[in-house]
Image (cartoon, grey):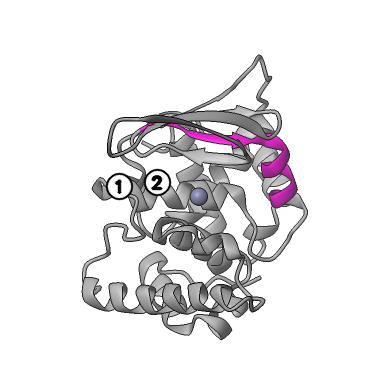
Amino acid sequence: MLKRHPIPHAIWQRVTSRIRVLRGLDAVQMAYLREMTTWFLDRKSITGAQDFEVTQSMRLTVAAQACLLILNLGVDYFDGWVEVILYPGAFRVHHAQSDAIGLVHDDAAVLSGEAWLRGPVILSWDDVERDSYHFEAGHNVVLHEFAHKLDGLNGAANGMPPLRSGMSRIKWSEDWSCAYDALCLQLAHGKSTHINPYAATSPAEFFAVLSEYFFTAPEVLKKYCPAVHKQLTLFYRQAASN
Ligand SMILES: [Zn+2]
């Protein structure tokens, strides 16, 4: 399946050598990532919104980082959706939401990325570019949005993706709840935190943000959320280093 449209070596080399989060991978892992990225580009569409012209470099930049998440999980973890949409920059969304008595709230926001439960991943190229080439610990919008896809694979975005065989759901829940509650408590007491406060929005955001840390700033995660760092090591089967 992986030989049909191989990414030319020169292009692969030129694009991936600039992506900060890939610098910790060795030659074997990079070769495998190239195969996974080839699969991704063959099976998923990456198109521009608002006539935005998406180049091969942009597609590779998104796909290679998305595939970093599933490097040791396998492509089945990206089942159930096909579409990635790139906006040139931050985009405005209106989400009509019905409350318990049927009132609809039009909730407007400006976003750098969004992942629909069974639909597309939507990204702002400005943000992808910044996070890919200008490293900031704990920030990577591609990893964040595709982590939501892993989380939502079992039908609900709740911070628990389908775990690998041998992993304990009970232990996962305990460790994540404990770390989540601790972060929420710190914020409630007005303390500054070492983890991006956005993580405290919901268990789903907590999983997505801590996945960003796992790959971009593992030492921060290991120091401040060691139990969760261990769970993510078991899940992603990678020892991220940057
Ligand atoms: Zn999110």
Question: In the image as oriented, which residue stretches furthest toward the right?
Answer: 134
Quadrant housing the N terminus: top left
Drawn side of residue 226 relative to residue 162, left or right = right
* Label 1 element class: helix
Drawn side of residue 69 relative to residue 51, left or right = left
Return the residue nearer the eye: 199 or 49: 199
Q: Is mark 2 within 8 Å of ligand 1?
A: no
The image's mark for residue 149 is: 2
Drawn side of residue 96 relative to residue 65, left or right = left
- In the image, is residue 90 part of the stretch drawn in magenta? no
In the figure, residue 71 lies in which quadrant? bottom left
The amino acid on which the numbered mark 2 sits, given as a three-letter code, is Lys
Drawn side of residue 112 relative to residue 233, left or right = right
Quadrant housing the C terminus: bottom right
Return the residue nearer the eye: 80 or 237: 80
Q: Percent position (x, y) of residue 47?
A: 56, 23
Return the residue nearer the eye: 204 or 182: 182
Count of marks, rendered view: 2
Q: CA distance from mark 2 to mark 1?
A: 6 Å
- Check if mark 2's residue and mark 1's residue have beta carbons within 8 Å: yes
In the figure, residue 230 lies in which quadrant? bottom left
- In the image, is residue 122 part of the stretch drawn in magenta? yes
Per the rendered image, the range of residues in magenta is 119-132
Q: Which residue is mark 1?
A: 153
In the figure, residue 89 lies in which quadrant? top right
Residue 5 in view here:
yes
Query: Image point 67% across, 48% down: which residue?
Result: 16
Query: Image point 69% across, 50% down: which residue?
Result: 132
